[in-house]
Image (cartoon, grey):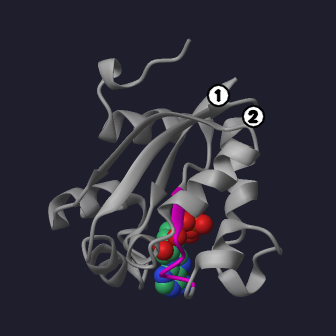
Amino acid sequence: MQQTLSIIKPDAIEKNVIGEILKHFEKNNLKIVAAKMLHLTKERAEKFYLIHKDKPFYNDLVDFMTSGSILVSVLYGEDAVKKNRDIMGATNPEQADKGTIRKDFATNIEKNAVHGSDSLENAKIEIAFFFKEDEIFIR
Ligand code: ADP
Ligand code: MG
C-alpha cells in the first residue's frame, strides 16, 4: 500500500469537474485520505516545480498553477503511485489513452487537469510539502 500526491489544477477547477476527477480515483480503488483547496503563491509554485526550473515552460507553468485555486489530495491504495499515473494519462492529452483524466478533461499539454507524484520517493516529498502529519489519517 502506498500514498501519493494528487493536484487538481486550476484549469479543471475552472471547468467545475472536481467531483468527476475524484470519482476516477474512487472507482479505481484509490482512497482520498486527505484533501484541501488552496491558492499557491508564486513562491510556493516555483518551489513545488523547482525540478523543472531550467525547462522552457517553467515560467508559464508557474503562472498557470497560480492562476486559480487547486485541490491537493493524498491518495492511498495498492501501488498508488503508478496507479494514479495510469489513471491520469499522458502529460500531453493528445497522447492520453481513452478513459484517462487527461483525455477527458485536459485542454493542452500545459493545462492538463492533474498532477501526480512520479515516484514513491517524490510522493513522500510532495505530501510533506502540502500536509502536516495530523492531516492524514489511514485506518
Ligand atoms: P507530468 O505532470 O505528466 O509529470 P512533467 O513533470 O513533465 O509532466 O511536467 C510538469 C507539468 O509541466 C505538466 O503536467 C504540464 O502542466 C507542464 N508541461 C510539461 N511539458 C510541457 C510543455 N512541453 N509545454 C508546456 N507545459 C508543459
Ligand atoms: Mg511530473
Q: Which mark is residue 2?
A: 1
Callout 2 amino acid: Asp
Residue 32: image quadrant is top right
Identify the magenta region.
109-115
Q: Which mark is residue 19?
A: none
Residue 16: image quadrant is bottom left
From mark 1 to mark 2, how far is it between C-alphas? Answer: 6 Å
Depth check, front residue: 32 or 119: 32
Label 1 CB, ligand 2: below 8 Å? no
Residue extending farthest to the top is 139
Circle 1 SS class: strand
Contact, mark 1 vs mark 2 (Cβ under 8 Å): yes
Circle 2 is placed at which residue position?
79
Indicate left or right for 45 with 120 as reference: left
Circle 2 SS class: loop
Quadrant occupied by the N terminus: top right
Quadrant occupied by the C terminus: top right
Earlier sequence position, callout 1 versus callout 2: 1
Callout 1 amino acid: Gln
Query: Crowdedness of circle 2 by 10 Å Cα count: few (<14), some, many (20+)?
Result: some
In magenta segment, residue 111: yes
Spot occupied by residue 35 in the image (x, y as percentages of width and height): 40, 41
